[in-house]
Amino acid sequence: TVAQIAELCMPSVVAITNKGVTEVQSWFGPLQQESESAGSGIIVGENDTELLIVTNNHVISDSTELKVQFIDGSIADAKVKGTDVNMDLAVIAVALDSLERETISNISIAVLGDSESLKVGEPAIAIGNALGYGQSVTTGIISALNREVTLTATNGETISNQLIQTDAAINPGNSGGALVNDDGEVVGINSAKIALGGVEGIGFAIPVHTAK
């Protein structure tokens, strides 16, 4: 059931808070102003010292401070390990020694599925930090595959990638979260939606085989 899949997958999804500085225009010229935005991430591995989390580049871009909140509500500092602006992907890391044993026992590493074998019409479940309120779950189907989508990257350049289209609701804050199949395997990384009047249920995710 969806409830069982959510219970299985939510421990591998995190909420990300990005604190940064943006430049705004005023009567006195450009001013720097503190900003805060929310996103999501997926725990995909660990090494001897770090927990590794994949997310969207636009979730962590221009950050001066990154915080990660886990399923048990605990919060830890994170640092950027690497980014790919053109694919809108990033990997961030949390030091294992900054986590309590209880937190480590409550979280899990996501199981990555096979996005190349997806079929249109298969169930799709989106998990993420919608609107910064904390984890939520939405359901739908795989609406289309290899959809060519053109977006503006954080550096201002136009990028075009082949993405999974889904009608599972993807809202601000869901970016970087998991799109999972009915086996609880991550098949996509939620990335964008079309937010125009008269448009409903068109969201996009980066295929996990591309992210790998």
Image (spheres, helix red, strand yellow):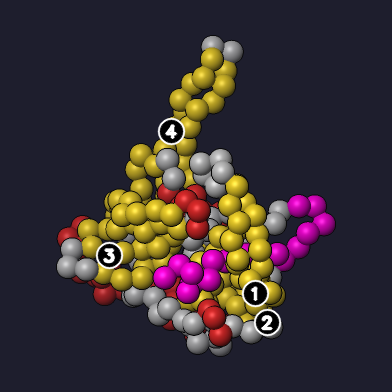
The answer to whether the residues at label 2 and label 1 have Cβ atoms under 8 Å apart is: yes
- Mark-to-mark CA distance, 4 and 1: 37 Å
Q: Which residue is mark 4?
A: 21
Residue 62, compared with residue 85, is above or below; it is above
- 149 shown above or below 210: above
Residue at numbered disc 3: 51
In the image, residue 114 above or below residue 65: below
Q: Which residue is mark 2?
A: 120
Q: State the residue position of label 1.
A: 145
Mark sitting earlier along the chain (4/2): 4
Q: Is residue 204 left or right of residue 176?
A: right
Q: Nearer the viewer, residue 164 or 36?
A: 164
Distance, label 3 to label 2, CA atoms, is 33 Å
Q: Secondary structure at mark 4?
A: strand
Q: How many marks?
A: 4
Q: Is residue 72 magenta?
A: no
Q: Amino acid at mark 1?
A: Leu
Which amino acid, mark 2?
Val
Callout 4: few (<14), some (14-19), or many (20+) C-alpha neighbours within 10 Å?
some
